Structures are given as C-alpha cells and as structure tokens.
Image: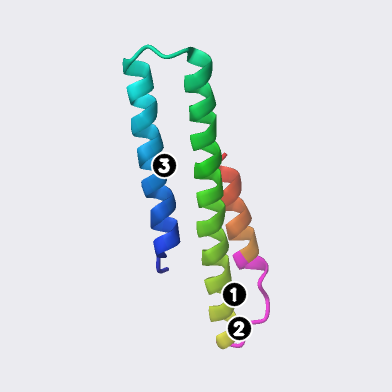
Amino acid sequence: MEYTDPMKNRLKRLEGQLRGILKMIEEGKDCRDVVTQLSACRTAIDRTIGLIVGKNLEECIKKQMEEGDLSHQKAVEEAVNMLVKSR
C-alpha cells in the first residue's frame, strides 16, 4: 500500500501536537489542559487509522475485482478487525 502525503501530514501534525503537550507538561500547565490535548491526539490518531484502513480496504477490493473475485467478505473482515484491534 502506498502511504499518501495527506496521511504523512496528519502524522506530522500529531508529532507537533505531542511536542506541544510535552512542553505544556514541562511548564507545569493545568492537568485539564494537558488531558484535553491528549484527547485531541487520540482522536487524530483514530482518524488516521481509519483513513489508512479505509485506503487499504479500497485497494484490496480493487485488486480482488481485477482478479475476478467478487467476494469482498474477507477484505472487509480484515479491515474491521484492524479497527477493533486499534481500540
């Protein structure tokens, strides 16, 4: 699977967010603010996982169709399992 620039950019933004949270902790910022930012990171990670799994599913189904296999059950099950395991 090819990882796209938008996927990479999401992770770079997350990296910046995490650095910001570390700075907040080092500066002794209020715990509620830190937890709020951590929750935002978790949401961003979940969305990135969804984007990657969705793209992978799309590619798997496209490949199966090209091979004449019209049963997409296995690919869908694998995608759902990846999402469940990520939580």
Could you give the CA–CA distance between mark 1 and mark 2, rounded to whole angstroms? 6 Å
Residue 63 drawn above or below residue 1: below
Q: Which residue is mark 3?
A: 14
User: Would residue 70 be counted in the magenta stretch?
Assistant: yes
Q: Residue at x 50, y 20 (%)?
A: 33
Q: Which residue is mark 1?
A: 61
Determine the secondary structure under disc 1: helix
Could you give the CA–CA distance between mark 3 and mark 2, rounded to whole angstroms? 35 Å
Residue 86 makes an appearance in the image = no
Asked whether disc 1 touches disc 3, contact meaning CB atoms under 8 Å apart, the reply is no
Crowding at mark 2 (Cα within 10 Å: few <14, some 14-19, many 20+): few
* Position in image of residue 45 (x %, y %): 49, 43
Determine the secondary structure under disc 3: helix
Q: Nearer the viewer, mark 3 or mark 2?
A: 3
Q: Which amino acid lies under the numbered mark 3 shown in the image of this protein?
A: Leu
Q: Which residue is mark 2?
A: 65
* Position in image of residue 11 (x %, y %): 40, 48
Residue 76 drawn above or below residue 16: below
Q: Residue at x 62, y 82 (%)?
A: 69
Which is the main secondary structure of the residues drawn in magenta? loop
